[in-house]
Amino acid sequence: MKNTRTWVAVFISALLLQACSVSYLQLRNELKENPSSGYGQPCNVKYSIFIEGYRKRADAGNAAWMYLDSFHEDRLQEYIKTTEEIIRGKRCIANYVGSEEDADLKIRIVNSGYRGAAPQDWLTGLSLGLIPSWKTEEDVYKYSFVSVSTKRGHSYSVDRKTFAHLVLFPIFWITFITSDDIADYKKALANFLENS
């Protein structure tokens, strides 16, 4: 019975330490305003979306990137729906085509996902959350857009900023709101359509 209580205490402690961090995503590389963009006029946009997902995996001390098929399949419909929303909001007709050769707007999404714990994360964990830590994971998401008609392209990067400390436990739930990559995708696509 005592052994069971010990394991339950360890499990609950591990959950609490995970809940002592707050993360948010930040979009970089936005285009400056360009009023000559043609997407404000009625148009017909054929677009393609290519998604890649990677995750860092450690095998016997060696880090390697692993391709994630499931990221592509799980998220494609969500990105299609969001893309159509944004394009229709610009008074255009949106048509998804599966092939990049047939597309007027080529969209490439790369998710490099979770990269593992950084040294400062270990320090915070080993001190049971007493020593604070923070980090920036660059290029967690990368959105690339190419307009075939204007022959312009641009890439946007999304960084994940994380703060960890015991005092963050009461507000850890904010991470569920601030880690929405679709919101950053919407901003990036709207910025590209307005300014390319």
Image: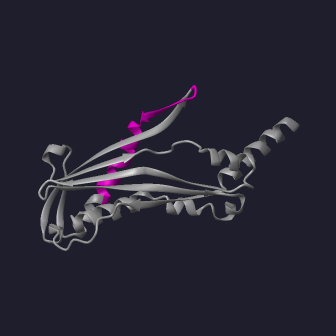
* Residue for point 63% across, 44% down: 119
Residue 29 position, x and y percent, is: 35, 60
Apparent side of residue 192 relative to residue 54 in the rendered image (left or right): left
* Residue for point 75% across, 49% down: 127
Q: Main secondary structure of the magenta part?
A: helix
Magenta segment includes 65: yes
60 or 107: nearer the viewer:
60
Q: Quadrant of residue 94?
A: bottom left
Residue 117 position, x and y percent, is: 59, 43
Q: Which residues are magenta?
A: 60-82
Residue 79 position, x and y percent, is: 33, 54
Residue 1 seen anywhere in this rendered image of the structure: no
Apparent side of residue 144 relative to residue 12 in the rendered image (left or right): left
* Residue for point 69% across, 47% down: 123
Residue 157 seen anywhere in this rendered image of the structure: yes
Residue 145 position, x and y percent, is: 25, 54
Magenta segment includes 162: no
* Residue for point 45% across, 59% down: 180
40 or 122: nearer the viewer:
122
Q: Residue furthest top?
A: 60
Q: Is residue 188 above or below residue 6?
A: below
